Image: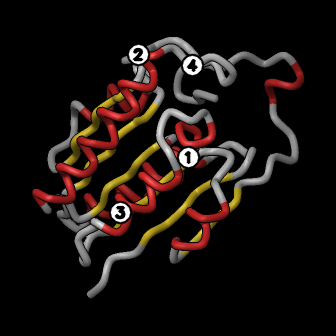
Amino acid sequence: MSGLTLVYTGNGKGKTTASLGLSMRALGHNQNVGFLQFMKGSKDYGEVKFATMLRNFTLVQSGQESFVSYEFPDPIDIKMAQEGLELARKWFEEDTFDLVVLDELLVAVAFKLVSVAQVIDLVKQKPPRLNLVMTGRYAAPEIIEIADTVTEMTELRHAYQRGVQAKEGMEF
């Protein structure tokens, strides 16, 4: 059976959460999951802590703990995003995962840490059986075009707008 390419995008909350839910489903079927986070480096995320409790689940972060500047990304942010892309390519070559999630890759593209062309080239290298999920705001039309399924999360209201701060278990 052929694997699918999914995109979770939009300004609403839930892109990473949806990809983690899909990961849980895959793990429930004893599948191997590779979860690569772009532009994230904090070990305080709940999913990073949870990943240490799971088997068949590999989580790697390819980013700093600090936010990335859209106008003036630090060269280390570009380097780390490029290294993340290379790791994804390596995972594709090794072909040991059933599901690979490239979390926040679409933001890395929008911030010009990686190019649309690089992502399209990567998707073309995907093993045929592999399910691939790419998440993040600002999905480029060219990436949307090559995906089998595209889901756009739409924010109707967010607690942060009322002054509610992120808290453990509800990272936003």
| Mark 4, residue position | 73
Q: Residue at x 36, y 25 (%)?
A: 80
Q: Residue 76 carries which label?
A: 2
Depicted 29 relative to depicted 81: above or below: below
- Tell me which numbered mark, 2 or 3, is placed earlier along the sequence: 3
Few, some or many residues within 10 Å of mark 1 (<14, 14–19, 20+): many
Residue type for callout 3:
Arg
Q: Do the residues labelled 4 and 2 touch (CB within 8 Å)?
A: no
Few, some or many residues within 10 Å of mark 4 (<14, 14–19, 20+): some
Q: Which residue is drawn at 58% across and 57% down?
A: 8
Q: Where is residue 122 in the image (x, y as percent from the top left)?
A: 35, 58
Residue type for callout 1:
Leu
Callout 3: SS: helix
- Tell me which numbered mark, 3 or 1, is placed earlier along the sequence: 3
State the CA–CA distance, disc 2 to disc 1.
Answer: 18 Å
In the rendered image, which quarter is residue 127 located in? bottom left
Depicted 56 relative to depicted 58: above or below: below
Q: Where is residue 74 in the image (x, y as percent from the top left)?
A: 51, 14
Residue type for callout 2:
Ile
State the CA–CA distance, disc 4 to disc 1.
Answer: 15 Å
| Mark 3, residue position | 25
State the CA–CA distance, disc 3 to disc 1.
Answer: 23 Å
Q: Do the residues labelled 4 and 1 touch (CB within 8 Å)?
A: no
- Tell me which numbered mark, 2 or 1, is placed earlier along the sequence: 2
Q: Nearer the viewer, mark 2 or mark 1?
A: 2
Q: Do the residues labelled 3 and 1 touch (CB within 8 Å)?
A: no
- Tell me which numbered mark, 4 or 1, is placed earlier along the sequence: 4
Depicted 142 relative to depicted 129: above or below: above
Q: Which of marks 2 and 3 is in front?
A: 2
State the CA–CA distance, disc 2 to disc 3.
Answer: 34 Å
Q: Residue 106 carries which label?
A: 1
